[in-house]
Image (tube, rainbow, N blue to C red):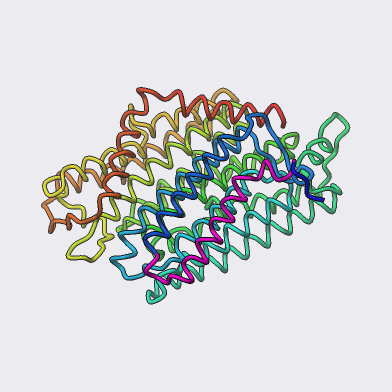
Amino acid sequence: MITTADIYPVLPELFLAVAAMALLMYGVFRGDKSTGSCSWLAVLALIVTGVIMSLLPENAESAFRGQFVVDQFARFMKWLVLLGSALAVVMSMNYNAREQIERFEFPVLILFASLGMLLMVSANDLISLYVGLELQSLALYVIAAFRRDSTKSSEAGLKYFVLGALSSGMLLYGASMIYGFAGTTRFDALAALFTGPSADPGVGVVVGLVFLLAGLAFKVSAVPFHMWTPDVYEGAPTPVTAFFAVAPKIAAIALLVRTMVGPFGELFAQWQQIIVFISIASMLLGALAAIWQTNIKRLLAYSSIGHIGYALVGLAAGSEEGIRGIGVYMAIYLAMNVGTFCCVLSMRRQGVLAEGIDDLAGLARNHPMMAAAMAIFMFSMAGIPPLAGFFGKLYVFMAAVNEGLYVLAIIGVLTSVIGAFYYLRIVKIMYFDEPADAFDRTAGREIGAIMAVAGMFTLLFFVFPSPIVEGAGQAAAVLFASG
């Protein structure tokens, strides 16, 4: 039976669900002419959801017999998800209008995907984990193929759907094995079951955990479950690619961290080696495969795979410091990626979007401010101090070193050096190559404003890092206090 105590912690999610359904009805009755107002109302709904979440009591609360939990970790990650989703909606408005794919369903689908992400971050049970994951995924499959008259977009949506269904099956199979051998799906019950000197997880639980990890690794596009990422990033409409690069990744990383540290924290020795492997493989592939890319969106796809590898270094450390590093890294990752995709959305000649890296040639002479912003994001992604990206990597690498994972940290540093090549190549093309035809100067004020704010955050993070670092620290502390 649902009680008032169950409703109170899920008020933000309830509000977002009602807002999404109300906007859907509004769009149905008003038609596509309501797309602009639907988009801004969707942004407002995401902001209000965050405000409601912030007004809830700070102490951890659970609902629905422990299946849903709200704590500092959930709040921190949910704010990043809501921010990423809101920015993606704003970034899509001008693009969708120009490409004549302006439909009111777009912001509504992003709201439903965001609702699934919020449920993922607060999942405290294998069943609620799966429900949140599928709610997010179903909306993402549709918006990946949102440009219906484009073969590439349809192909991206189909690939994402088929491979996503496969990964969901693997995750569900792993969850069913864990339930079969452990007798419970609740995270706190699983944690209690594996605690103590005489606790023996058994082979069945470990095999189930491997399948569960495989499904979650697909959602964060970690190697070897990354194969969908370059094709979907290239084929999907650019604002959709920007959305995929930030909010779903942050939610999936949060879910992965909560699942590993909470119920399976005592099985650290069993899953650490898997995380170390996929972290190293992701960093290596992200650094090496991007070198030969000529399409900026495919390059950013491999870049995101590499960044997920760096974030997983913090999880491999298995410490409170490592989880804090992940929180800091994902906040910085959000700013860098949103800013970069604003630059990509501004790459337009005579109304046609340009996606080639060579199209950036001589950008510093034609659009000096845009070139400066792009250079800041590229230097930051390469991890060059004193930009924000350097500190993101510093926190996770230091966590690994403090836990004795010297080889992992060294590989991370080396792959950062290799990856710096293709980031700096973009800077070289912008500043030193012969200018190509100038881009249109009509990207939109919203895009320019987001690019400027993201650039300032990336450039000046070192001046005042404490809000992000302290917030991530409190989030990590809660996990280890309850884990």
Q: Read off the magenta span.
A: 5-34
Residue 264, picture quadrant: top right
Note whether 319 is above or below 448 in the view shown: above
Note whether 222 is above or below 80 in the view shown: below
Would residue 221 appear left or right of 126 to someone viewing this image?
left
Q: Is residue 25 magenta?
A: yes
Most common secondary structure along the magenta stretch: helix
Residue 84 point in image, percent of width and height: 45, 47
Q: Residue at x 38, y 77 (%)?
A: 149
Residue 89 point in image, percent of width and height: 41, 54
Residue 402 point in image, percent of width and height: 57, 22
Whether residue 217 is visible to the viewer of this picture, yes or no, is yes
Closest to the observer, 106 or 398: 106
Name of the residue lying farthest toward the right = 198
Note whether 11 is above or below 164 in the view shown: above
Closest to the observer, 205 or 330: 330
Residue 52, picture quadrant: top right
Q: Residue at x 74, y 44 (%)?
A: 6
Q: Residue at x 41, y 68 (%)?
A: 103
Residue 106, picture quadrant: bottom left
